[in-house]
Image: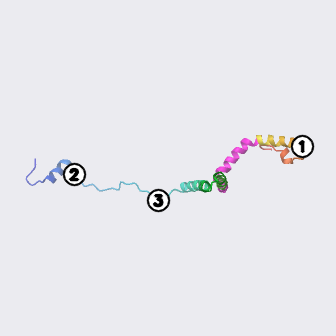
Amino acid sequence: MLSENETDRHRTERTSGVGRHARKHHDQYSHYSHEMPEDTKEATGRVIIRAVPVIYAGVIGHLTDHTVVSLILGLALSVGLDLAMGKYSIARAMWRTCSVAGCPFIAATSRTVAKVMRMLGMHPPSSMRDMRCGVS
């Protein structure tokens, strides 16, 4: 039981276990760095370069009531900036994919137009007559 000298505080510490072992306080919080990793910086920059011209063009077009024209110009600027990115260009990769898939159609159409031009008495360019896809 309680001795005569024990106060309520001492009784609470003895029964609850508080104060028995003094624990050192360890930092339990996350340490955040204010710098992004290099890959994240590059990816963020590429997204900004592609998106900002289109967004600004949309806003300006909406304000001037020429939304479609402004969006086309903004998209053209965005594609131009994207092509300047070299190996990170999305437009260049898409162009390669589309040109591989669309080349047979374009070559057949070009040869047909050249034949029609010849039938009408015109002289089609040789590049139009001899267009081929793939490795020659």
User: Which of 76 and 92 lies nearest the eye of the viewer?
Assistant: 76
Badge 1 marks a residue whose secondary structure is helix
Q: Give the CA distance from mark 3 to mark 2.
A: 38 Å
Mark 3 or mark 1: name the one nearer the start of the chain: 3
- Mark 3 vs mark 1, foreground winner is 1
User: In the image shown, does 116 or 15 lie closer to the viewer?
Assistant: 116
Task: Give the main secondary structure, helix, strand or loop, of the magenta stretch.
Answer: helix
Determine crowd level at label 3: few under 14, some 14-19, many 20+ residues with C-alpha closer than 10 A.
few
Give x and y (percent) for residue 75.
65, 53
**Do the residues bearing badges 3 and 1 touch, measured as CB atoms within 8 Å?**
no
Q: Position of residue 31 (x, y in %)?
A: 41, 56
Q: Secondary structure at mark 3?
A: loop
Question: Looking at this view, is 1 or 76 the one in front?
Answer: 76
Task: Check contact, mark 2 vs mark 1: CB within 8 A.
Answer: no
Give the farthest residue toward the bottom: 34
- Kindly identify the amino acid type of the residue bearing the numbered disc 3: His
What residue would you read off at disc 1? 118
Q: Quadrant of residue 111?
A: top right
Per the image, the residue denoted by label 3 is 34
Q: Quick one: label 2 or label 1, which is nearer the N terminus? A: 2
Question: Which residue is the site of mark 2?
Answer: 18
Q: Does residue 43 sit above or below 111 in this rendering? A: below
Q: Residue at x 66, y 50 (%)?
A: 91
Could you tell me which secondary element the residue under label 2 belongs to?
Answer: loop
> Residue 40 at what x, y percent from top left?
54, 54
Which one is earlier in the sequence, the residue at label 3 or at label 2? 2
Crowd rating for badge 1 (residues with CA inside 10 Å; few <14, some 14–19, many 20+): few
The amino acid at mark 1 is: Arg
Q: Residue at x 79, y 42 (%)?
A: 107
The colour scheme is rainbow
User: Which contiguous range is marked in magenta?
Assistant: 80-104
Membership of 61 in magenta stretch: no
